[in-house]
Image (cartoon, grey):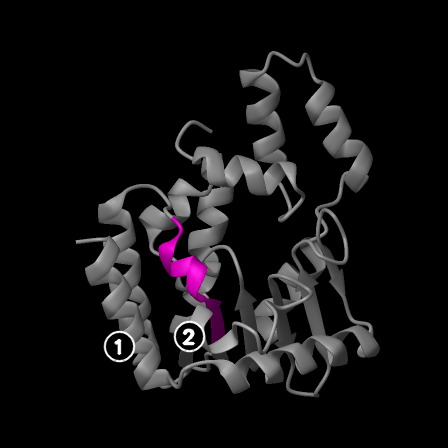
Amino acid sequence: MANKGEGWTSQLVNGRFTPHIEDAKAMDEILNADGQILNAWEEIYGGRNPFADYHASEPDAKLIISTQMIYVPTLVQTPAYARSLTTGDEVLADRLDRRKLLDRAAAPHLAVLLDESVLRRTVGDEEIMREQHDHLIEMSHRPNVTVQIVPYALRRGRVAVSPSGSFSIATMADGSSIAFLEAARSRFGTSTRDPETVADLLKEVATLQAYALNVEDSRTFVREVRGELWT
C-alpha cells in the first residue's frame, strides 16, 4: 500500500474506482482494523467483484473501448506501472495476464481515450512514467490499437470530462456489448449489459473522440508530456 501514494488514496476515499479484495485485506492489516474493513468489503460486494462479469466477457470481444480519466488502462499498462497500482501478487498476475489479449492471433481492436491528466498523474516514479509513456506510443503503432488524448485546451469551455468517468465497453461479434463503469454511476463500479446505458456511454465516447487529438498528434502529445515531466 505504501507505494500507491496520496493520489490513489484520495481516489479510493472518493469512490472513484473499485477496490479489490486484496486492497481491503492490506488496509485492514495496516490499519489494525481487526477484520472490519474486510468485512465491509464482503458486505458491499456480497462476495462478488462487480468487475467479474466484464472480466469474463472481455476475452470474447472484437472491439474494446476504454475511456480513462485517472489511470492508463490495464491492457496497455507496463508491468511496473501495473505493480504500482496493485496490492497482492494475484491481482498483479491477473492484470498482466489481461494484457496478453492484444497479442492473440485474432486480437480485438482496442480504442483508448485518455484525458490529459492521465499522462501527468504520477504513478510510481519518473522511470516508471517514462517507460509507460514510451509503451503507450509503441502500442499505438499496432494495427489493432488506437490511442487518442483529450487535452485540457481542446475541451475547456466546450465539453466536460466524461460524465460517467472512466469506463470500458466490450463489443462481441454478434453486436452485443457489456460495459464496466468504474465509479460515476455506482460508487464501487458495476458491469452492465443494459442497452440504454451502453448507448449513453457510446454517446460520451463520440463526444470525446470529436475533441480528441488524432492518433498521430496524440503520439506527439505523449512525447511532449514525457519530455516536459518525466525526463
Residue 104, numbered label = 2
Height in image: 8 above or below 59? above
- Relative to 220, 102 lies left or right: right
**Type of amino acid at the residue the image marks with label 1:** Thr
Give percent across and percent down for residue 223: 24, 69
Residue 220: mark in rendering: 1
Which type of secondary structure does the marked residue at label 1 adopt? helix
Can residue 64 be seen by looking at this rendering? yes
Q: In this view, does 216 lie to the left or right of 50?
A: left
Mark 1 Cα-neighbour bin, 10 Å: few <14, some 14–19, many ≥20: few
Report x, y in % for residue 24: 62, 30
The residue shown at (73%, 33%) is: 41
> In the visual, does 164 lie left or right of 126?
right
The answer to whether residue 196 is above or below residue 101 is below
**Alpha carbons under labels 1 and 2: distance apart:** 28 Å
Confirm or deny contact between disc 1 and disc 2 (CB under 8 A).
Answer: no
Q: Give the range drawn in magenta.
A: 111-121
User: Which circle's residue, 1 or 2, is located before the other in the chain?
Assistant: 2
